[in-house]
Amino acid sequence: MLIGKVVGRAISTMKHRSFQGVKLLLVQAYDASGGPDGEPVLVVDNLGAGVGMRVLISSDGKGARELVGAKDSPVRWLTVGVVDE
């Protein structure tokens, strides 16, 4: 699990069928010193997070696939919490 900041939303007209009706966010993960940790990742969100919010994300692909309801989904990242300020 990582803490990151929502830096944008993803909208697509062409996508895997498992992403239909699912909110997608672009999240920049941070390392222990508070600096960016790699490139932003595409995250499935069912918590209602918005741009500028800090979130806890997980790369648990199985959990993410359960969230979208498709065992063959290419999804990897999901939000698991919103960090209080």
Image: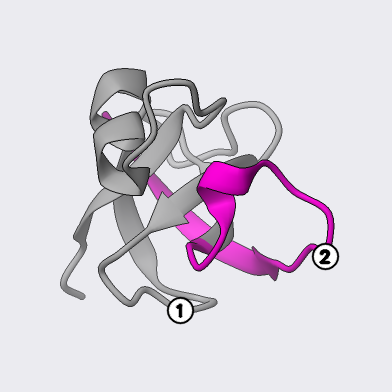
Q: Quick check: 36 left or right of 1?
A: right
Q: Is residue 34 magenta?
A: no
Can residue 46 be seen?
Answer: yes
Q: Secondary structure at mark 2?
A: loop
Q: Which mark is residue 13?
A: 2
- Examine the image and state in which quarter residue 59 appears: top left
Mark 1 — residue? 50
Provide residue 2's location: percent of width, then percent of height: 33, 34
Image location of residue 61, percent across then percent down: 36, 21
Amino acid type at circle 2 is Thr
In the image, residue 74 above or below residue 64: above
Q: Is 5 part of what is drawn in magenta?
A: yes
The residue at the point 54 percent across, 38 percent down is: 35
Magenta part of the chain: 1-23
Above or below, comparing residue 24 to residue 79 in the picture: below
* Quarter of the rendering containing residue 11: bottom right
Kind of residue at disc 1: Gly
Question: Residue at point 83% right, 65% down?
Answer: 13
